[in-house]
Image (tube, grey):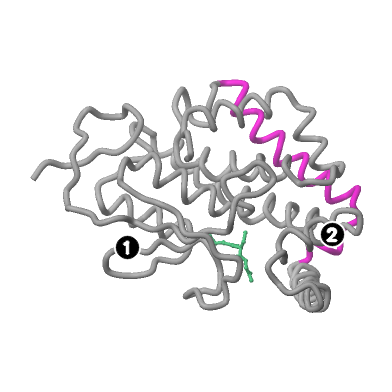
Amino acid sequence: MPETVISLGYSQDNIHPKEHHMLLLYTYPRGFGQFSLSPFCVKAAAFLQLSGLNWSRRDFDDPRKMPQAKLPVLHTDERLIPDSNNIRRYLENEGAIFDPDLSDMQRAQSHALTRMAEEHLYFNLVLDRWGNDAVWPTIRDRYFANVPALLRRPVANGLRRKLMQGLATHGIARFSDKDRLARVEQDLQAIQSCLWQSPFLMGNRPTSADLSVGPMLAAIRSTPVQTPLSRRVAADAQLSDYIARLEDTVQLP
Ligand SMILES: N[C@@H](CCC(=O)N[C@@H](CS)C(=O)NCC(=O)O)C(=O)O
């Protein structure tokens, strides 16, 4: 049976190794102009889209019954796969190639950029949405829209308290806003150093690093009440063009 090499013109061999039934992406709903309220769900959707396999979405508000109590999760014929990176690995095992022609050095850079986006930019996004009193009421009413009105505030505030404790333990919530923004600026500069070289982080086509970094930047920019961080990304023509370029190329449904 023919082999697939997935994605956007990387190969003409557009054939799948196995017959698939529908892959179902369990995701948080759309919101703030994005495919999902969660950048990890947008990332997983982008990997699925570039894989060329058939997939569709199923929306959840509440991740508690999921294998790691988080979303995204991919429902395949055989199992539930939690975590966007595991979803990527699954698709690669099915024959998808997301990083063709990258050197070992580029793969190392790509890995570092991905970790930076997911383990540092992400927590700044969370603080922007959950930790900022000006933003929080909008987030609460959007994320917890399906919780009955009388319970909404206590449920949301309880989760918020837990999350903020986690971010204090992590350490990121201990910085002043100013120091935190200065740290994020270093990340943005690193991303922009790549983008001065080429339209996508690793060259002329999106690769895996773009699928982590792009959705994270887009999520930061889409926070519904403006913050210094969301304004920083929104006001930057290079970053905004990059997000648009990636969205145009990936074409999420
Ligand atoms: N490492 C995970 C991160 C996923 C993640 O953090 N999802 C968040 C939303 S952005 C979530 O479901 N949080 C629910 C919770 O922690 O209770 C991945 O790459 O998929």
- Tell me which segment is drawn in magenta: 171-197
Tell me where residue 156 sits by quadrant: bottom right
Side (left or right) of 209 relative to 5: right
Q: Is residue 180 magenta?
A: yes
Residue depicted at 72% across the width and 64% down the height: 145
Graded by Cα atoms within 10 Å as few (under 14), some (14 to 19) or many (20 or more), the crowding at tag 2 reads many
Residue 99 coordinates in the image, percent (x, y): 38, 38
Residue depicted at 54% across the width and 48% down the height: 42
Could you tell me the amino acid type at mark 1?
Thr
| Extreme residue toward the front, this view | 149
Q: Name the residue under label 1.
A: 76
Which label number is shown at residue 64?
none
Residue in front for this viewpoint, 203 or 220: 220
Residue depicted at 91% across the width and 54% down the height: 134
Q: Mark 2 points at which residue?
A: 136
Q: Is mark 2 on a helix, strand or loop?
A: helix
Query: Vertical placement of 39 versus 69: above or below?
Result: above
